[in-house]
Image (cartoon, rainbow, N blue to C red):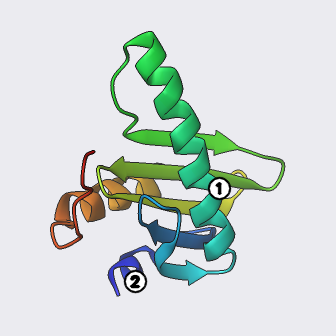
Amino acid sequence: MRLDLLRPVPGLVGAVLAGPDGLPLETLGSGGDALAAEVTSLRAGLERMGRRLGAGPVTRVAFTSDRVEVVAVAGESFILAAALQRGTDTRGAQQLLARLASELTDLPMLEHA
């Protein structure tokens, strides 16, 4: 499983590799289905904003809530995300997500209409 690389990340609550439809392709830890759907939805909203501002595609997203820090890396046909306990240094998770993203070459590409 590709996400096993994230297991040693301190404070990891869960991680997901999701397709562009928001369905999880792989999950690790708890809340993978919800994380997949929500970061995909967030990405879609940010993509709309980016198009309107002429900013280009969204490739990274990070946010903090009362209980977790979420970091995500997006490619054309996927989104990788990790949720960590709040207060955890997210740099290691971000680096591993970027590494995984660069290695994802076997996923089906989106068809453009």
Q: x, y percentage for residue 86?
A: 73, 54
Q: From the viewer's perspective, is the residue at label 1 or at label 2 nearer?
A: 1
Image quarter hosting the N terminus? bottom left
Instruction: Say whether marks 1 and 2 touch (CB < 8 Å).
Output: no
Q: Which residue is mark 2?
A: 4
The answer to whether 91 is drawn above or below residue 16 in the figure is above
Total marks placed: 2
> Residue 38 — which label?
1
Can residue 8 be seen?
no
Label 1: element kind: helix
Whether residue 66 is visible to the viewer of this picture, yes or no, is yes
Residue 43, horizontal then vertical, whole percent: 52, 43
Q: Residue at x 33, y 80 (%)?
A: 2
Residue 27 relative to residue 57: left or right: right
> Which residue sits at x=47%, y=32%?
47
Label disc, if present, on residue 57 of the rendered structure: none
Task: Sort mark 2 into few (<14), some (14-19) or many (20+) by Cα contacts within 10 Å.
Answer: few
Q: Amino acid at mark 1?
A: Glu
Residue placed most toward the observer, 37 or 16: 37
Instruction: For mark 2, give the secondary structure.
Output: helix
> Which part of the image, by quadrant, shows the C terminus?
top left
Q: Locate residue 103, reporting x and y percent.
A: 18, 65
Q: Residue furthest right?
A: 66
Give coordinates of residue 21: x percent, y percent: 48, 61
Instruction: Tell me which numbered mark, 1 or 2, is placed earlier along the sequence.
Output: 2
In the depicted structure, whether residue 18 falls above or below residue 101: below
Q: CA distance from mark 1 to mark 2?
A: 21 Å
